[in-house]
């Protein structure tokens, strides 16, 4: 091995590469800082607006700090009354909890049949279910509205729960099938030899190994149902049945020009239940994401 000839090194080239690397890091840091600022600014705007009165908000300094924190209570009270937020939150929570959990459970049953039981035509049934994720949801509006009118399901909580349950099944089937197919089939055969029924195998063996992905899917479907406006607006018109997002739309259309601070307070309140549910189930949610990446 020969010693390195120091005279053969191009120190100018090394210095240029070092400067270019430093400039690249500085440029990357600047871009990340700009993106972070662009992401944080709307939240800052929301945070300062909910603590302002309508007169203070109308002074034309939207990013200025509020003069006091006291107006927040009045904004919350006004937003709660004008939006009928109690009824809207109850309806959205009912649709999300019942529709999301029922959809994930039915999807788990379907995946058990598709992955653990041998029968002809499994590929056809999977593609039939999966086709629900291919087409845009807007194409269901007119036939769904006409069918609900004939069946008397418009403006009813039962109709909304049935719709959300059905529309949320295909995506969990797609995700759970991959996870459930990875579980060893030998445990099923051993349970059948011991005399277990198919539902007992599903309940006692498969479900405990799928709680993580199922929790993650439930959070995703609950959030989608909670934030849905289109189908709630089409299928419900009564205040006692409409969802929270429908109430926010009515509030924004009626009071956005007069009291925008109240509208933003209402949107802040509307986002709190989904955040709370995520923090409660975050451990299972992260576990489900890790299992999907294995």
Image: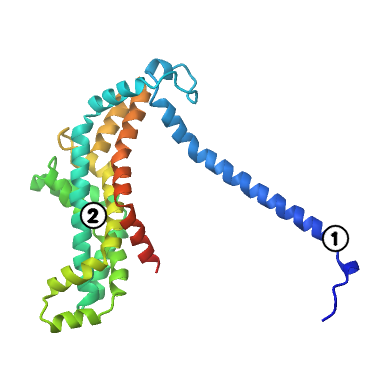
Find numbered disc 2 in the image and state the secondary structure of the residue it sits on.
Answer: helix
Residue 245 sits in quarter: top left
User: Where on the picture, by quarter, is residue 266?
Assistant: top left
Can you identify the residue that label 1 sits on? Answer: 11
Q: State how the image is colored.
A: rainbow
C-alpha gap between disc 2 and disc 1: 65 Å
Residue identified by numbered label 2: 167
Q: Position of residue 119 (x, y in %)?
A: 19, 79
Q: Residue furthest right?
A: 7
- Where residue 241 appears, as percent x and y from the top left, is 16, 37
Is 17 located above or below residue 177 in the figure?
above
Q: Are marks 2 and 1 in contact (CB under 8 Å)?
A: no
Count neighbours of disc 2 (C-alpha within 10 A) and say few if under 14, some if 14 to 19, many if 20 or more.
some
Residue located 71% across and 52% down the image: 22
SS category of the residue bearing label 1: helix
Q: Residue at x 40, y 15 (%)?
A: 55
Q: Which mark is residue 64?
A: none
Image quadrant where one finds the N terminus: bottom right
Q: Residue placed at 62% from the left, 47% from the top?
A: 29
Q: Quadrant of the C terminus?
A: bottom left
Few, some or many C-alpha atoms within 10 Å of disc 1 (few <14, some 14-19, many ≥20)? Answer: few
């Amino acid at each position: 091995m020969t010693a390195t000839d120091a005279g053969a090194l191009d120190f100018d080239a090394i210095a240029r590469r070092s400067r270019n690397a430093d400039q690249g890091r500085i440029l990357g840091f600047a871009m990340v800082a700009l993106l972070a600022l662009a992401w944080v600014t709307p939240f800052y705007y929301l945070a300062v607006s909910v603590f302002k009165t309508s007169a203070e908000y109308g002074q034309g300094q939207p990013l200025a700090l509020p003069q006091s924190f006291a107006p927040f209570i009045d904004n919350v009270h006004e937003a709660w009354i004008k939006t009928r937020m109690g009824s809207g939150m109850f309806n959205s929570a009912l649709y999300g909890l019942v529709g999301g959990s029922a959809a994930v459970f039915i999807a788990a049953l379907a995946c058990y049949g598709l992955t653990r039981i041998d029968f002809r035509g499994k590929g056809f049934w999977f593609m039939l279910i999966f086709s629900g994720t291919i087409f845009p949801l807007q194409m269901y509006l007119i036939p769904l509205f006409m069918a609900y009118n004939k069946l008397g399901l418009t403006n009813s909580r039962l109709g909304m729960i049935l719709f959300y349950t059905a529309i949320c099944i295909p995506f969990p089937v797609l995700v759970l099938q991959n996870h459930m197919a990875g579980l060893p089939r030998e445990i099923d055969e051993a349970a059948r030899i011991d005399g277990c029924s198919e539902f007992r195998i599903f309940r006692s063996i498969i479900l405990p190994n799928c709680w993580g992905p199922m929790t993650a899917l439930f959070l995703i479907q609950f959030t989608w149902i909670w934030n849905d406006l289109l189908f709630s607006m089409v299928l419900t018109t009564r205040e006692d049945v409409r969802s929270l997002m429908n109430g926010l739309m009515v509030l924004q259309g009626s009071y956005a020009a007069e009291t925008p601070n109240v509208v933003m307070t209402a949107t802040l309140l509307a986002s709190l239940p989904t955040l709370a549910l995520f923090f409660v189930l975050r451990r299972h949610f992260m576990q489900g994401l890790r299992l999907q990446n294995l």
